[in-house]
Image (cartoon, rainbow, N blue to C red):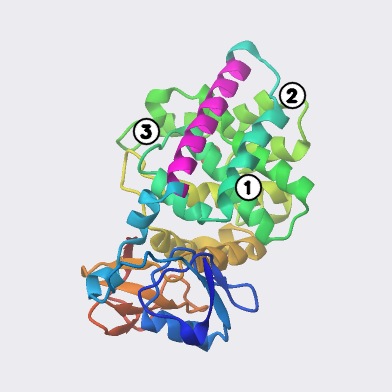
Amino acid sequence: MTKTATKDLLAGTYTATPVYSKTGQMILPAHTLLTTQQISRLEFYGIEWVNIQEVPADTSEPDTKEEEFVSFSQKIRKSREFHTFKVDYKNKTEILESSFENLLTKNTPVEADKLLGQVSSLYANHFTSLSVFDMLHNMRQIDDSTFAHSVNVALIARMLGEWLHLPEEELDVLTLAGLLHDIGKCTIDPKILSKPEALTSVEFSQVKMHPKNGANILNSQKLDSRIKLAALMHHERCDGSGYPAGLKRDEISDFAKIIAIADVYDAMTSNRCYRKGLCPFEVIATFEREGLEKYETKYILVFLTRIIDTYMGNSVLLNDGSIGNILLINSQKLSRPLLRLTNGEYVNLAKRPDLYIQGII
Ligand SMILES: [Fe+2]
Ligand SMILES: [Fe+2]
């Protein structure tokens, strides 16, 4: 890794660490292939220097358009960081699965410290090098079980808690709340949970029992009451449209509101049996359309803005088949950034309702 002044940067080199603006906004993630446009952006943001990865001396200059747009996902999947994350993640979801089983069949006490230790280490060990979001995005293609969903929600909720500057002790409670929020699903017939067709009203009312069933399971445990409330209230919505009780904004626990956002984000981006997983930009567009009344405003705005920052500099695929790099985020329309296409054209998605981002590549 070499610390290089922005004025001396060369297109075709890779960032070694993420680049942040003076206000803490992520401008480029680690391992980004620098293009001349990205170097101009760094100058625009007043970045004075960047950590660059060492390049072997015999590497020929990557100067073709295709090389400029090497898939970010491909790079992640090939990276050593992703490989160790994958192994670690699999171990952790297996531990969670056996701990759920013991709780349900033998009523064994939840080993809160052990569970938390597992997930916190997953978070701490992998957060700095590559974004947890990028890794989860790639993990979903490999493992999409309820247990994996619980680990995802725990990681996403912890990250949102950090963005909200919650103290460490509350982050731990929030992480456990994420891990245990769907424990009630273990009481629902697995055939219903994995049914590819639309559910009948009887089946849907059974699924809707899982928050209450989960809270009942956790009530017999020595756990922070906010964890029990998150299990009970994570499907409640601020506008009263949720279940099981149709509670309103002030009646819903704060942790349940945070878990609700992490839960919906993970459910929408995962590949469920009934439809292909949505791209994070489509999810953000959905949140933008209906999010503000359903979710706690002060949480959802921080969440969406920070998620978008995570994908800054990535290559994306548009619905017309063209590929581009994200150059600038439009704070009024988070799902519609300014892009530079592979053919050199600039596209402002805020002014092109016919186009939308279909996937991150
Ligand atoms: Fe749930
Ligand atoms: Fe969930």
Q: Earlier in the sequence, mark 1 or mark 2?
A: 1
The kind of residue tagged 2 is Gln
Q: What crowding class fits label 2: few (fewer than 14 Cα within 10 Å), some (14-19), or many (20 or more)? A: some
Is 170 rendered above or below residue 55?
above
The kind of residue tagged 3 is Thr
Q: Which sits in the foreground, 160 or 276?
A: 160
* Extreme-top residue of the structure: 106
Residue at the spot of label 3: 200
**The quadrant where residue 46 appears:** bottom right
Highlighted range, magenta = 81-104
Element type at marker 3?
Answer: loop
Residue at the spot of label 2: 221
From the top left corner, tell me how far across and down residue 7 is, in percent.
49, 87
**The quadrant where residue 143 appears:** top left
Closer to the observer: label 3 or label 2?
A: 2
Is 318 rendered above or below residue 45?
above
Residue at left offset 26%, top offset 83%: 344
Magenta region includes residue 96 = yes
Query: In 3D space, how far apart are the residues under numbered discs 3 and 1 (Cα atoms)?
Result: 42 Å
From the top left corner, tell me how far across and down residue 21 is, in percent.
59, 77
Query: In 3D space, how far apart are the residues under numbered discs 1 and 2 (Cα atoms)?
Result: 27 Å
